[in-house]
Amino acid sequence: MNIKTSYIFVRHIQIGLLSADNISRDYLANQWGKKGTTSDITLYTVVQNDITQTTVIPSGYPKKLLPLVISAHMSDVSILGVSKQGLNSEVGEIALLLDCLNMKGIRAVIGSDVKGLDSFHDQMMKVFSKLSLSTWPSAMAFDGSTAQQTREAILNQCESPRGSPDEYLAIEVDHTFPVQGVGSVILGTVINGTVHKGQKITAYPGNHTGTVRSIQVNDVDAKEAHPGTHVGLALKGILPKNLERGVVLGNPSEDEIRELEDVENLKVKFSAFGNKSEDHKKVHVVCGLYDTPSIITEWGNNLSIKFEKAIPFHPKTRMTILDLNKKPAILASKI
């Protein structure tokens, strides 16, 4: 965490660049920002006109499905990226996920010297006619010369952040590092509330409590951070092993953040091409950025689910239910 002068950027946007094609998504992301933290998801950041834009790409997909879901859960708006080779099963899988999450975004054919946008667009409209993506306002070709237009199209889809700065605090952790002389450093998104330097903070699940030693936004020191901001926090008193991806940071004894072992009558949007099945079906649940094997104990218009391990849950958590043994794997998302 480099130290610079204190400044808080006015607006923060996280964009999910969701594609299975490494070449096309890296091509676009490199046009847009500086490559940052890399794991099975990769972050690119750029600051322009007082807007901090973090692009999240699922670099571990399509080998693994979880990076795709986690990238979507992190995002305010999305790009459904199609390579020059056209539509395939992965594009369909991404479309089903975005539809279940009711995400906004654009469709983009990505690559140098892009041709055939009209034919791709016609294919998309036919294949995705049952999905909310069919109403997305933009279908674009991105060949490097249209970076600004693509950025503007994305910004036009962005509304206010998911959360309120004056409500409960919830920060979803996406990366954690032990730093000598500092302690635990996390990267995460402020989903709700406001985090302040020096405040007490608790990691859920586990109720591990510590103190916020420092806050950085885009490598710049800040005294506080608000909803929508991707932050770096140095924490005192909480070990890195208790700050795995998906942990939610909040105020101590926060009533709005719970550790759930099960959920009943969960309202979901089912995949347009998924299959409802019998009770006690083994599934995998991604809650925010936290994931666990689970069992569906009751099917219906709503779902009841038993989790293998307790999950951190708050009102603005995104949740997606997967069947990792089937295609398509996307079953439903919480609404």
Image: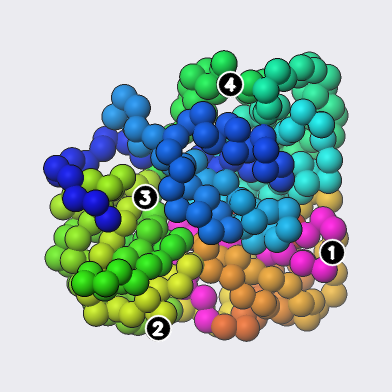
Mark 4–mark 3 distance (CA, rounded to whole Å): 26 Å
Sooner in the amino-acid sequence: mark 3 or mark 2:
2
Amino acid type of the residue that numbered disc 4 sits on in the rendered structure: Gly
Q: Quadrant of the C terminus?
A: bottom right
Q: Nearer the viewer, residue 287 or 166?
A: 287
- Which mark, residue 144? 4
Residue to which mark 2 is pinned: 206
Q: Nearer the viewer, residue 71 or 320?
A: 71
Amino acid type of the residue that numbered disc 3 sits on in the rendered structure: His
Residue to which mark 1 is pinned: 326
State whether residue 195 is above or below residue 19.
below
Mark 1–mark 3 distance (CA, rounded to whole Å): 33 Å
State yes or no: residue 314 in magenta: yes
Magenta stretch: give its range. Answer: 310-329
Sooner in the amino-acid sequence: mark 1 or mark 3:
3
Asked whether the residues under the numbered discs 1 and 2 touch, taking CB atoms below 8 Å apart as contact, a structural biologist would say no
Asked whether the residues under the numbered discs 1 and 3 touch, taking CB atoms below 8 Å apart as contact, a structural biologist would say no
Quarter location, residue 195: bottom left
**Residue density around tag 1, few if under 14, some if 14–19, many if 20 or more, within 10 Å:** few
